[in-house]
Image (cartoon, grey):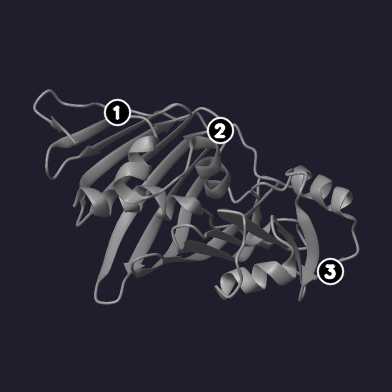
Amino acid sequence: MMRKVLFLFIIPLVLYSCKATQKAGEGAKADLNKRTEQLIDSINKHEMSPKTISFKSAVDIKSKDKKNSVKMNCRMQVDSVIWISFTAYGYEVARALARPDSLFFVNKTKKEYFSGEYSFLEQKLDLDIDFNQLQSILLGNAIDIDDPNIKRSNDNDLYLLSTLKKRKLKKAREKSHRIDDDIVVSNWINPANYRLSKLQILDLRNKRSALIKYQDFKEIDNFVLATESTITIKSKQKLTIENQYSRININDEERFPFKIYDSYTPIR
């Protein structure tokens, strides 16, 4: 149960969205002629950067032989804290709190807790991620585009910014070519709104990957959000996560209550 709930904490967090009235980017003419510097500048200008954000979501998790559904309530103060509550069958089953240098988690069904560093995720779940990466994925912002070695190309009607050239990226995904990089990050950017349309993270050393697709962009409070997403995780097993989000609030005052009860035992 601990592994399952922690997995829910890291992976379904990666996307959010909201109900809104206006489609974002529809009818805009695609411009795939920007130079790399111009493109990165446009992406940075359009990135999601509120002071606070909160949302609720329904998450469906599918594996080869199982299907689970949970409700998630997430609150975030950018660059400071991420708070999540998980609910199943009307009851809160877990709560998590992430700060830049620490991670906290309580499993209410087993009365267990964790308090420590992000290295715990690598040790227990083989997930090498820190607060800043998690925050960027959660906000739907591109990753590693300021890397001096970033490669820019066009892929159909999207911009592609990757730590590998397009040709090598294809070979790496097909596992037919040796790549020196351990981690390859690729961002597909929608030229209509300069928001992330697709994100892929390849962990070549450990033979695992995450592919996140953002759909149905809408605008609220001058921010462009994706109202639907599909996440595909490939590791020892294939995991698909479908997300639909609602009740999003931007720049409201938020609370982040978190308590570890004396009767709870630590997770080792």
User: CA separation, marks 2 and 3?
Assistant: 31 Å
Q: Amino acid at mark 3?
A: Ala
Residue at x-position 59% and y-position 51%: 140
User: CA separation, marks 1 and 2?
Assistant: 18 Å
Kindly give the residue lying farthest to the top in the view shown: 262
Mark 2 element type: loop
In this orientation, which residue lies closer to the viewer: 198 or 181? 181
Q: Position of residue 151 (x, y in %)?
A: 77, 57
Mark 1 element type: loop
Badge 3 vs badge 1, beta-carbon distance below 8 Å: no
In the rendered structure, find residue 35 and report the number of the disc placed on it: none
Residue with the mark numbered 3: 30
Quadrant holding the C terminus:
top left
Badge 2 vs badge 3, beta-carbon distance below 8 Å: no
Horizontal relation, residue 34 to residue 15: left or right: right
Q: Position of residue 218 (x, y in %)?
A: 64, 59
User: CA separation, marks 3 and 1?
Assistant: 45 Å
The correct choice, above or below, for 259 with respect to 87 in the image is: above
In the rendered structure, find residue 78 and report the number of the disc placed on it: 2
Residue at x-position 37% and y-position 46%: 73
Horizontal relation, residue 24 to residue 236: left or right: right
Residue with the mark numbered 1: 258
- Residue 117 appears in which quarter of the rendering? top left
Q: Position of residue 8 (x, y in %)?
A: 34, 53
Mark 3 element type: loop
Q: Residues within 10 Å of mark 2 (few under 14, many from 20)?
A: some
Q: Residues within 10 Å of mark 1 (few under 14, many from 20)?
A: some
